[in-house]
Image (cartoon, grey):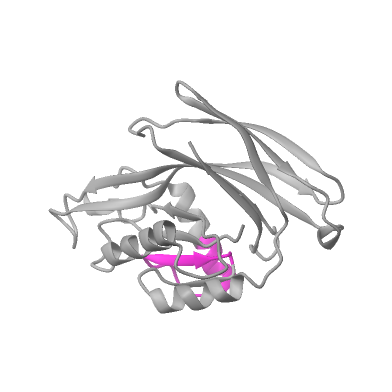
Amino acid sequence: MNPCCSSFSPPKAAQAAPPADRLLQILDEKQPVPGADLIVLSEHVDYWDRLGWRDPFSSPQYTVRQQDYTNRFNFDGVYTPQLVVDGRYGFVGSYGHEASTAIQKAIRERKIAMTISDVARDGNKVTARIELPVDEDFKGRQGILYVALADNKQESYVARGENGGRTLAHVAVARVLRQVGTIDFNSASTKEIALPVQSGSGNELRLVAFIQDPKSGHILGVAAQKL
């Protein structure tokens, strides 16, 4: 599987946010780039909450992640909406042509195979097994394993800001993101994970697991499964 995008986008930040949401929806549902199996996550930052209306899906954790990408890309500062492809390319989140170009570049990068199995939801908890095989191309390297639980679809009514009075539609809204630990690629590994289902989440969820290079921030492998 080839990872696509982490979208950093608060719904009230700018008029560009709704087009960014639509682009992420197209990437997710239509899979428009041949040869790419696109896996998306929408991470809502919290630094626009000071406008007087709190984005119900925002988290300072996603703000920190965006700042980390900003530092890696040597950008002057954070902005929204932003799209990050494969941990390698960052640009305005509504730029469809740049997204297509970045994805085409990203699918040339070798990824380690990883699988998600035994996914189960028991009340407000989701459990699963993440498995990573031995891969000769990755021996001698390490990666950080993350797991995310996201709502397949969500809506938010924007009370204030440039999008005030609008109801916006979102896909793959990250509600929980956990760092599981460092993975040594010299041997196969299996991780049993458990994530809480957040209040307000519906019945349609997705579990996303990805490995990130601790130095470059590049995505080394990814898997996803809808519940």
Q: Is 99 inside the magenta-drawn segment?
A: no
Give coordinates of residue 52: x percent, y percent.
Answer: 21, 49
| Residue at the limit of the structure toward the top, as seen here | 123
Examine the image and state in which quarter residue 37 appears.
bottom right
Which of the two residues, 198 or 101, is positioned nearer the viewer here? 101
Q: Which residues are magenta?
A: 67-87
Question: Residue at the spot x=56%, y=65% of the render?
Answer: 36
Is residue 54 among what the camera can see? no
Identify whether 160 is placed above or below 193: below
| Residue at the limit of the structure toward the left, as seen here | 165
Give coordinates of residue 156: x percent, y percent.
Answer: 25, 47
Q: Is 73 inside the magenta-drawn segment?
A: yes
Question: Residue at the spot x=54%, y=65% of the render?
Answer: 69
Is residue 147 among what the camera can see? yes
Give coordinates of residue 1: x percent, y percent.
Answer: 62, 57
Q: Is residue 71 left or right of residue 8?
A: right
Total number of numbered labels? 0
Question: Residue at the spot x=35%, y=33% of the render?
Answer: 202
Give coordinates of residue 189: x percent, y percent.
Answer: 78, 41
Q: Is residue 105 left or right of residue 21?
A: right
Question: Residue at the spot x=23%, y=67% of the render?
Answer: 15
Q: Is residue 133 left or right of residue 61?
A: right
